Image (spheres, grey):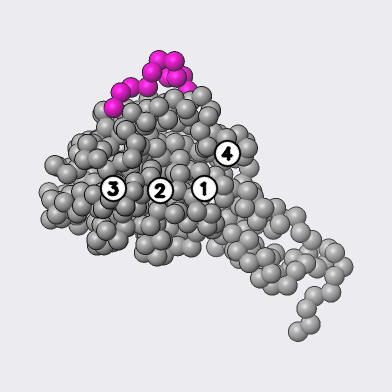
Amino acid sequence: MKQEYSDWVHAPAAKPDTNAQEAAEARQAQLTKPPGALGQLETIAIRLASLQGSVCPTIERVQITLFVGDHGVVAEGVSAFPQAVTLEMVRNFACGGAAICVLARALEADLEVINLGTIDPSPPEIQGQVTDRRIAAGTANFLHGPAMKQAQLQAALDTGREAVIQAKESGTQLFIGGEMGIGNTTSATALACALLKTPADRLAGPGTGLDPDGVSHKAAVIEKALTLHRPHLTDPLECLRRLGGFEIAALTGSYLTCAQQGLPVAVDGFIAGVAALIAIRHNPDVADWCLFSHASAEPGHKTVMQALPARPLLDLGMRLGEGSGAAVAVPLLRLACALHAGMATFGEAGVSEKDD
């Protein structure tokens, strides 16, 4: 049965500004350097110009929104860490001790943590630092049925949308969606397998630190789930409902909304990349607004990037999640903008141009 979604889910994406892109290309051609000498830094600046509608784009206001949720499939022993770690990490986020908190402070970025569905609610002492959008006590175990009811999926998508609209209204120039949820690499791998029609043993990875036997067990659980759900895995959002998590759905909703609102988004690693794949399969124009920040060490990420196709900006062997890889890429984006705006042209510097 075809599921019904709120109208906004099907709204078109904004169009990049081709006039700004052409003006940025013309400016690059006049800067005091050989054409193409700054490589991808030139490409980044030109692309951001088209997305911001400005010849000289800037990345000053950055919003990092961290979506959190637990996964029912953890009951199958697919994670090296207990499920309680999800809520313990929420406390760590609230207290400023996690990697993404350090990165947000260093970048002077705004950071919001949204609890969409930990097993237990956020404790009272941190409720002022965590936005409560708890849908349920984790998703259902997708080895036995759909991970989410239709209303739960819509609520998670809506939460992602609300986060982006709030960010846009506050003047954000770049959105980063992060995630936390024990078991979510299992969910993301199952989604990638379903969308790309790839066996689980090719995409399953260690996640939070599984040994080879643990990875093999994880792949076997995913294959069983794919067999159960396969007759229904024909639509990206239905794949998300059956195999996804609340935080992955919120990321998907945030990417759809960034494209609709004309807000550039830096996509993190494997889990965020799978959410972007879902959004792009639902609406291919979402890809225009996605900057893929880094190549995750999770084995499935390379396959996802090839399928999009996309070329990540960095390759640092990271696989933390939380939006951390996207945050690490922000200085690169800022430097690309600074070079583009701050370098002198040949005429301004009195430097002779290349002979024809």
Q: Mark 2 or mark 1, which is nearer the start of the sequence?
A: 2
Q: Nearer the viewer, mark 1 or mark 3?
A: 3
Q: Which residue is mark 1?
A: 326
Q: Is residue 41 magenta?
A: no
State the quadrant of the C terminus.
Answer: bottom right
Q: Looking at the image, which is closer to me, 294 or 166? A: 294
The secondary element bearing badge 3 is classed as: helix
Q: Secondary structure at mark 2?
A: helix
Residue 204 showing in the rendered view: yes
Sort mark 1 into few (<14), some (14-19) or many (20+) by Cα contacts within 10 Å. many
| SS type, badge 4 | helix
Which tag is nearer the camera, tag 3 or tag 4? 3
- Residue density around tag 4, few if under 14, some if 14–19, many if 20 or more, within 10 Å: many
Q: What residue range appears in magenta? A: 119-130
Residue designated by label 3: 214
Locate residue 104, reporting x and y percent: 57, 36
Hey, what amino acid is under mark 2?
Ala
Count of numbered tags? 4
Q: Residue at x 33, y 22 (%)?
A: 121
